[in-house]
Image (cartoon, rainbow, N blue to C red):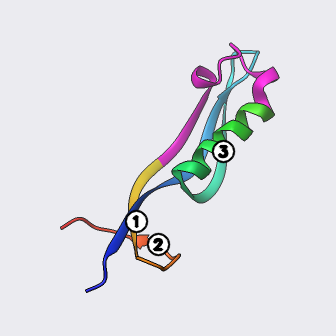
Amino acid sequence: MKKLKTKTHYIVTGAKIRFKDGAWVNYKLGVMDMTKKEFDSFKVSMIRQFKKKLYSGDAEKDIQYVYNEVEKCNELGSGNYSTYDKI
């Protein structure tokens, strides 16, 4: 029997950003499937992109991400992950 390796993936579909004028703007980003490391890198790149334009300058308050966390698994040695439903 092969062992399964699970990993949490973040399915990002959008972001909500508050700019200096106080207005919130919604961005639709399509469907992006990311691991934790990729999601953290994505957040850093968003902060770099919009830092000077944010309302308070604090990205944690001014950028909200629309995402779902999904457990995915693969067989050890395989690079492909698929959705994993816990039984």
Q: Quadrant of the N terminus?
A: bottom left
Residue at label 2? 81
Please report the residue visible at 69 percent of the width from the left and 37 percent of the height from the top: 44
Q: Is residue 13 visible?
A: no
Amino acid type at image mark 1: Lys
Q: Characterize the local packing of mark 3: few (<14), some (14-19) or many (20 or more) Cα atoms within 10 angstroms.
A: few
Q: Nearer the viewer, residue 69 or 36?
A: 36
From the viewer's perspective, tell me whether residue 33 is left or right of residue 47. left
Amino acid type at image mark 2: Tyr
Secondary structure type for disc 3? helix
Secondary structure type for disc 1? strand
Residue at label 3? 41
- Real-space Cα separation, disc 2 to disc 1, in angstroms: 6 Å
Lower position in the chain sequence, tag 3 or tag 2: 3
Lower position in the chain sequence, tag 2 or tag 1: 1
Residue at label 1? 72
Please report the residue visible at 62 percent of the width from the left and 40 percent of the height from the top: 15
Please tell me the numbered disc located at residue 32: none
Q: Are marks 2 and 1 in contact (CB under 8 Å)?
A: yes
Is 51 contained in the magenta span? yes
Question: Quadrant of the rendered structure where residue 3 is?
Answer: bottom left
- Real-space Cα separation, disc 3 to disc 1, in angstroms: 20 Å
From the viewer's perspective, tell me whether residue 51 is left or right of residue 32. right
Give percent across and percent down for residue 37.
57, 49
Q: Nearer the viewer, residue 79 or 39?
A: 79
